[in-house]
Image (tube, rainbow, N blue to C red):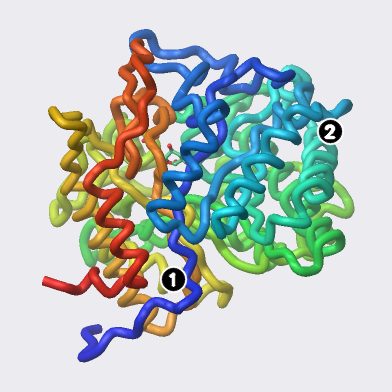
Amino acid sequence: MNYSELKPFPTDFLWGGSTSAYQIEGAWNEDGKGPSVIDMSNHTQGIADYKVASNHYHHYKEDVKLLAEMGLKAYRFSVAWTRIYPDGDGEVNEKGIDFYDNLIDELISYGIEPILTMYHFDLPFALEKNGGWSDRKTIDAFEQYAKTLFNHFGDRVKYWLTINEQNMIILHGESIGTSSQHDENKQADLYQQNHHMLVAQAKAMALCHNMLPEAKIGPAPNIATIYPTTSKPEDVLAADTYSNIRNWLYLDVAVYGTYNPIAWAYLEEKGYTPTIKEGDMETLKKSKPDFIAFNYYTSQTVGESLNDESDYSHTGDQHEIVGEPGAYRGSVNDNLRKTEFGWEIDPVGFRTVLRELYSRYHLPLIVTENGLGAFDKLEEGDIINDTYRIDYIQQHLQQIQLAITDGIKVFGYCPWSAIDLVSTHQGSSKRYGFIYVNREENNLKDLRRIRKQSFYWYKKVIETNGKVLNEV
Ligand code: BG6
């Protein structure tokens, strides 16, 4: 729908930026931090690991100062579970608490709202050794961890995110490095892990509401709109099937406390249904999020399954592998351009996702990731001319404004990433930040922070509360 006039962004809109602990902090074994599954996973030779990353652990003051200069109203970061509980549970590591206390205080001193993700891919390795999410004990460990976070930071943190991209952990754990297996039937094991995470999340949400009545908490999945490859009814149906498996399975449980029927039928057909213990469904029903946070990078396109291996569209990463024999067939969308890393760029699909989410769940929305990974070039005079990133973000923000005009409640936007960091599996040269970090894959150089063109542009967007977005 076209409008003669657009509604403005709300005056209290949370213009933000986003990062995650293991991708930005470094200091992987300092001050008592324990190893996580990411620290212990096999690392591709030749690309940056997470040992130093952007060394934010030692640069956080300088980093926050830059974020404040850019005008951020909110900063979404994650806490490394292994800094707080080096062994996943048991003894608290006070130095880990101190780090996040200082980071939060620093943000607040500049008037930046902290948005805290409790768990972003980096499960403590000590828990993984004992079965990880396949073992129900990890639910208790997460609840204990959540309690500690609420206790220590709840006086200052109003916005909480439970688990980052649980759906990607289940569907694409191998490409992002979280995949684990504790049973012969890998897929069934994954959906058992999924169930335990959903229960853990519900418990954390209930705890949050009990301990911090003023705070707000929500899940943070990755949501993509799913297109049918043609208007053939079978293709349209396949797109709906995939959307239920990829998107709504996770959010229906979080919001309504029930398993999505189409996703459940898929689990039954494949033999992947999880064991649900007495009391689990009550736990899931008892808590409800206050908002939905979600990450959006691209849309996906599928058609009717041909029921063989050719259903897989291609082998790539979390945003490229699509297809499953018997369910839906992966396809590409010829209407869309791609990033240098092969991800389709679809700002209009973003507006569709915002509409779909709000129509299904009637909860306020916040975008916790959206951005463009690219090989930025540092030119003489410390110039990084990332106009492609400005284009990407501008087009996506314009779609948010259209969605707001559609009547969708969106209260914040935290693009990925506030500062350059190390990608999930493509190293440090796949950059997303507004601020350049001067390092190469295997050469840490001076880790100097340099403002990119997009830094100055985003600053102006924030200063004008989005008005510049529509200036020609
Ligand atoms: C999301 C993750 O999947 O996408 C981030 O939450 C990740 O951790 C981001 O970095 C971009 O993906 P990648 O693979 O390019 O780092």
Ligand 1 closer than 8 Å to the CB at disc 1?
no
Left or right of 411 in this view: 377 = left
- Name the quarter where the N terminus is drawn: bottom left
**Quarter of the picture for ligand 1?**
top left
**Mark 1 residue element:** helix
Q: Residues within 10 Å of mark 1 (few under 14, many from 20)?
A: some
**Disc 2 residue type (three-letter):** Lys
- Disc number for residue 356: 1
Q: Is residue 468 above or below residue 49?
A: below
Question: Residue 457: horizontal and vertical position, in percent?
Answer: 25, 56
Seen at 58% across and 18% down, the residue is 39
Left or right of 207 in this view: 431 = left
Seen at 67% across and 40% down, the residue is 102
Question: Residue 54: horizontal and vertical position, in percent?
Answer: 45, 27
In terms of sequence position, does the residue under pointer 1 or pointer 2 come before the other? 2
Residue under numbered circle 2: 137
Nearer to me, 460 or 164: 460
Question: Residue 74: horizontal and vertical position, in percent?
Answer: 52, 57
Q: Is residue 268 above or below residue 376?
A: below
Among the 4 quarters of the image, the one containing residue 423: top left
Nearer to me, 328 or 342: 342
Seen at 81% across and 60% down, the residue is 206
**Mark 2 residue element:** helix
Q: Residues within 10 Å of mark 2 (few under 14, many from 20)?
A: some
Q: Is residue 344 visible?
A: yes
Seen at 52% across and 16% down, the residue is 51
**Disc 1 residue type (three-letter):** Glu
Q: Is residue 119 above or below residue 315?
A: below
